[in-house]
Image (spheres, grey):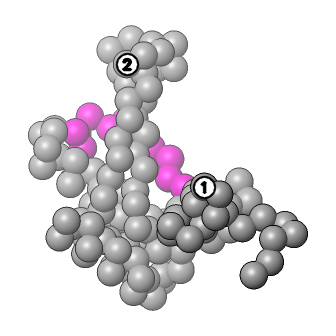
Amino acid sequence: MEDIDLACKDALNGIPSRRPIIEMTIPSVLDQTISPPGQHVINLFIQYTPYKLSEGSWQDLGIRGSFAQSCFSLIDEYAPGFSSSIIGYDMLTPPDLEREFGLTGGNIFHGAMSLDSMFLMRPIKGWYA
């Protein structure tokens, strides 16, 4: 819980999380056609990544690389040797998600996921308070 709190606070302050919250999937375990034999494709979804950085820009390759390496290093804590097994990666930051997929603010949830906007309470065109 402390890591989640810290990651959220970092994002609110425009800082790439020092201990990012990572969701990892390995789709090539189920579909071997998407990677060469003996290799895997891994997707990392990093929660609480700021859209706008307080210092610098996501366009800076050094900032992008540094954040990617911090994510890989965190995974190394749980899966030793992970970083050394990487042969390439692609990264989509919140501005990339907005530009490529039209996700406002890079938010994959399309806005806040609070109780007042879920299920039947979800605001829709024509419903006004």
Quarter of the figure with residue 103: bottom right
Quarter of the figure with residue 99: bottom right
Give the class, few, some or many, for how many residues have Cα within 10 Å of label 2's Cα (few <14, many ≥20). Answer: some
- Is residue 65 something that shows in the picture? no
- The answer to whether residue 2 is left or right of residue 13 is left
The secondary structure type at the circle numbered 2 is helix
Q: Identify the amino acid type marked 1.
A: Phe
Name the residue beneath numbered marker 1.
119
What residue is drawn where x is 53% and y is 80%?
52
Give the mark nearest the N terminus, 2 or 1: 2
Query: Can you say which quadrant of the picture contains the C terminus?
Result: bottom right
List x then y, in percent, for residue 111: 60, 68
Query: CA–CA distance between discs 2 and 1?
Result: 33 Å
Residue stretch in magenta: 82-92
- Mark linked to residue 29: 2
Give the class, few, some or many, for how many residues have Cα within 10 Å of label 1's Cα (few <14, many ≥20). Answer: few
Q: Identify the amino acid type marked 2.
A: Val
**Depth check: 118 or 91 in front?**
118
What residue is drawn where x is 43% and y is 68%?
49
Disc 2 or disc 1, which is closer to the eye?
A: 1
What residue is drawn where x is 19% and y is 65%?
1
